[in-house]
Image: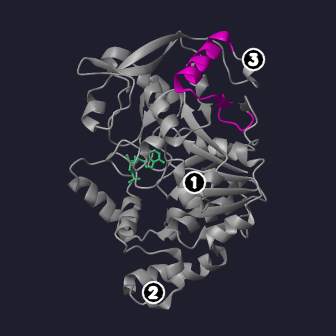
Amino acid sequence: MNLVIIGAQWGDEGKGKIVDYLADRAENVIRFSGGANAGHTIVAGGRTYKLHLVPSGMVYPGKQCLLGAAMVIDPEALFNELAELETQGVDWKGRLFVSDRAHLVLPSYKAVDKEQDQKRRFPIGTTGRGIGIAYGQKANRDGLRVCDLYDEKFYSRLTAEEKAFLDPYKEKLAPMVVNAAYWMEERKNSMNLFEGAQGALLDLDSGTYPFVSSGFSCAAGASVGGCVGPKKLDKILGIFKAYQTRVGNGPFPTEFKEERDGDLETLVRELGHEYGVTTGRARRCGYLDLTALRYACIVNGITGLVLTHIDVYDGMDEIRACVGYRIDGKETAEFPSKITDLEKAEPVLKTFKGWKKPLGGVRSKAELPTECLDYLNFIEEFTGTPISIISVGPDRDQTFNAEDPWTK
Ligand code: IMP
């Protein structure tokens, strides 16, 4: 079975935790897109793991993990991360594989990434990890792929500086390199978990362009980067937080405003620990945007939603969520393509009653307070998508299913 999990907002929805939770039953975990711009936090067995490139399934002994064909890999960042995992007792050797079609990120790309952002018509606030430069080189048919490390003709055209950087990684990477199409074909009857990075609204094509990342954070990316045909994807799960966050620049219609919302942003940021794993930047916070979530469900064919951080609302009298936009005085239920429209959009907010009870100890949907269930039912109806998994805290065991994610 091929189960895909993507972020359904602007990233940071809690993918690390949920992939780790789902990895329990997976045999293989395939990270299909992005690079070291991602930051996934996993809390398991009393330890906290912070991952950027390595699939979250790696912290589970015995799982095989693949860095897919649509990824851009900084080898230095990869081996630093693996060394850190080793100090935390994770034995990764023999379990991590790298697609030979994945592209490589060179050190020089990082400075160019930051420089280029200043020159953009609309600076996007890149993480500066060289991701956009690697994808740009790829689209320009001048990129450097993992397989090119072992192609003498190709390698001879690299500069002395590039070779000096890459030489040590040729040998280190060699035992991990696979032709991913056949690696996946051999595992076609296994339980395969496809792990997305970033989120639906940061996807190059269907996100809030140009304020997006440069990879495929959409569900279709699982097919491209995971080297399986689209008809082979059995289920698409979309993770969303009970509120909305964004890192970097770009329109954010439901962002908290002091004049309207008082100190709600500070409260949500502190309760939800909304600081970037990769950059440490404070995340922008706002009301849950159901208009954007519905769009993400439509454009990605999401078959089930995964709700995280619902416990952030435990102490609140009431909860608000966006159910449409007012743009130039006109109400719309559609997520606009034009950035200016998104910037002008005033959220139409619906208020729900709070439950005023801690949810951290809840272990089934039936135990949820009525007010919370009302909120969840509304989300399901509005997006036309069932909520399949609910997370009520950072630990692995603070998670429960409304339906078994591993059945077709
Ligand atoms: P880049 O991918 O580093 O070029 O960054 C492009 C935009 O995507 C910036 O606004 C980043 O803050 C955002 N971004 C990239 N990766 C992530 C992520 O994993 N979570 C949240 N935002 C991200």
- Which of the pair 204/158 is nearer the observer? 204
Q: Alpha carbon of mark 2 to alpha carbon of mark 1: how far?
A: 29 Å
Q: Residues within 10 Å of mark 2 (few under 14, many from 20)?
A: some
Q: Alpha carbon of mark 2 to alpha carbon of mark 3: how far?
A: 60 Å
Q: Are marks 3 and 1 in contact (CB under 8 Å)?
A: no
- Which of the pair 343/73 is nearer the observer? 343
| Amino acid type, callout 1 | Ala
- Which of the pair 39/291 is nearer the observer? 291
Residue 292 within the segment the image draws in magenta: no
> Position of 82 compared to 286: left or right?
right
Q: Secondary structure at mark 1?
A: helix
The numbered mark, 3 or 1, whose residue comes first in the sequence reads: 1
| Residue 322 percent across, percent down from the top left | 43, 21
| Residue 159: quadrant of the picture | bottom left
- Which of the pair 300/60 is nearer the observer? 300
**Which mark identifies residue 367?**
3
Bounds of the magenta span? Answer: 369-397
What residue do we see at 54% from left, 47% from top?
A: 219
What residue do we see at 58% from left, 68% from top?
A: 79
| Amino acid type, callout 2 | Tyr
> Position of 154 compared to 20: left or right?
left
| Amino acid type, callout 3 | Glu
**Which mark identifies residue 155?**
2
What residue do we see at 40% from left, 73% from top?
A: 143
| Residue 368 percent across, percent down from the top left | 70, 17
- Mark 1, residue position: 222
Instruction: Report the number of discs.
Output: 3
Q: Are marks 2 and 1 in contact (CB under 8 Å)?
A: no
Q: Residues within 10 Å of mark 3 (few under 14, many from 20)?
A: few
